[in-house]
Image: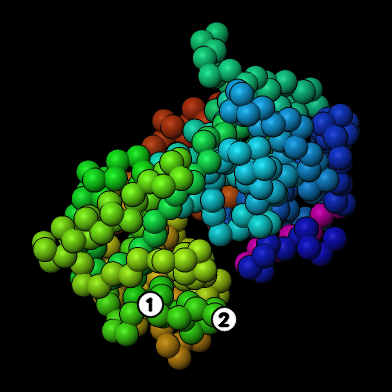
Amino acid sequence: MRSYLTDWRNAFRGKAALVVRPATTEEVAAVVRLCHAAEVSLVPQGGNTGLCGGSMPDDSGRQVVLSLTRMARIREVDPANATVTVEAGVVLQRLQEAAAEAGRLFPLSLGAEGSCTVGGNLATNAGGTAVLRYGNMRDLVLGLEVVLPDGTVWNGLRSLRKDNTGYDLKHLFIGSEGTLGVITAAVLKLFPALRSQATAWVALPSTEAALALIGIMRDLGGDRLTGFEMMSRQSVEFVLRHVAGCTDPFAQTHPWYVLIELGDTLPDAALGDILETALGEAFEQGLVLDAAIATSEARVAALWHLREGISEAQNHEGPSLKHDISVPVSSIPAFIERADAALQEGFPGVRIVCYGHVGDGNLHYNISKPVGAEDASFKACAEAIMHAVYEVVAAFNGSISAEHGLGQSKHHAAALYKDALELSLMKSIKQLLDPKGLMNPGKIFVS
């Protein structure tokens, strides 16, 4: 049971009475009915790749972990309707491959795609690197199948793009982190496959330059702009130090970098020309210090490896404090400046690993301990550091969780920083659907 009772970072651990691994919706429903009758709490779990402890049981040893990993069937691929129907345990990478085999694209892409599952992506409303063009997981869903807390099954597996027959119930369960029911299957949107791509690694003097550059890229590239990922030098240094096979694209170091990707459905689209024109304009405006356009698939993969390796690399530097925040895109430079200043004033020497998805305002603003500091003393500052960051987030009317969810690591913060009326309405929905409070207790809300 060990792998089900700790997360991949060993940041959260729990105990459980047992782990159940149903293979069908009917088996999930049977388990939920038994637990409902016996008033035993259930903790739904997918690939267990989350960062907030949302799929971990508590330490009572009385909860049941409900693993969905055996529910791994792709039920239907419908190219004409541009949809795919999959079960919750399907690994994201397998879904991407199934879409590609049908000549289509499923665009959700994130670092854990080789192990995270569709159910977990739905439960946390996952984002990733292509949100700029395709949206979050919520934007990719047409229908859901959900086992409700009493064991009844809601079959909402509709593949309709228009259905104006009242409340759109699927949105209650997307992002609910298993607190309202167990998502067992989904109908998801497919898109035309991208047949041309252009990728560049760009060095910048400031975050203000990144904001100006994405404006240029949008003006010239339009919807072809698929990815625009910003990273601080500290983020890149950790990757170069700890992730095998990564090399610095430039001879000199620079304060900030962006990874830009354009994509088109035409096989011979002149994306390289668009990219060169945009970067040339940015050079003239003093926004770009250096740039390297990838000329091979291997080089594209190497550049993305630099970006995707940040989270793993930071773990090698000792405990880290993860802050998955969002602010209005226009506020990104001001947020970083103010948050950096607040942390260095209150906690001198902390290393700030800031990177994220500039186009949607989502930053991973993570903190590593000062060089030579003791793990224990750094962890003792965790709550104070969190509040220092979230106070700045609140000042910009942002969110303390952009794509990772609240889980058990942020539910206390949510009680402080989320609107009281919103929380009250959310609790009313929880009480309506799960009056016994058996579905993933201790997540999202303070118990």
- SS for callout 2: loop
- What's the residue type where badge 2 is placed? Ala
Indicate which disc, 2 or 1, sits on the residue closer to the N terminus.
2
Query: Which residue appears farthest toward the bottom when viewing the image?
Result: 372
Q: Position of residue 282 (x, y in %)?
A: 17, 60
User: Taking 294 as reference, is 152 left or right?
Assistant: right
The residue closer to the viewer here, 283 or 258, is: 283
Q: Position of residue 107 (x, y in %)?
A: 53, 43
Q: Residue tagged by mark 2?
A: 244
Residue at position x 42%, y 88% in the image: 371
User: Taking 62 as reference, is 290 left or right?
Assistant: left
- Is residue 57 visible in the rendered image? The answer is yes
User: Taking 401 as reference, is 52 left or right?
Assistant: right
Q: Main secondary structure of the magenta part?
A: loop
Looking at the rendering, in which quadrant would you find the N terminus?
Answer: bottom right
Q: Residue tagged by mark 1?
A: 249
- Is residue 325 visible in the rendered image? The answer is no
- What's the residue type where badge 1 is placed? Pro
Residue 14 within the segment the image draws in magenta: yes
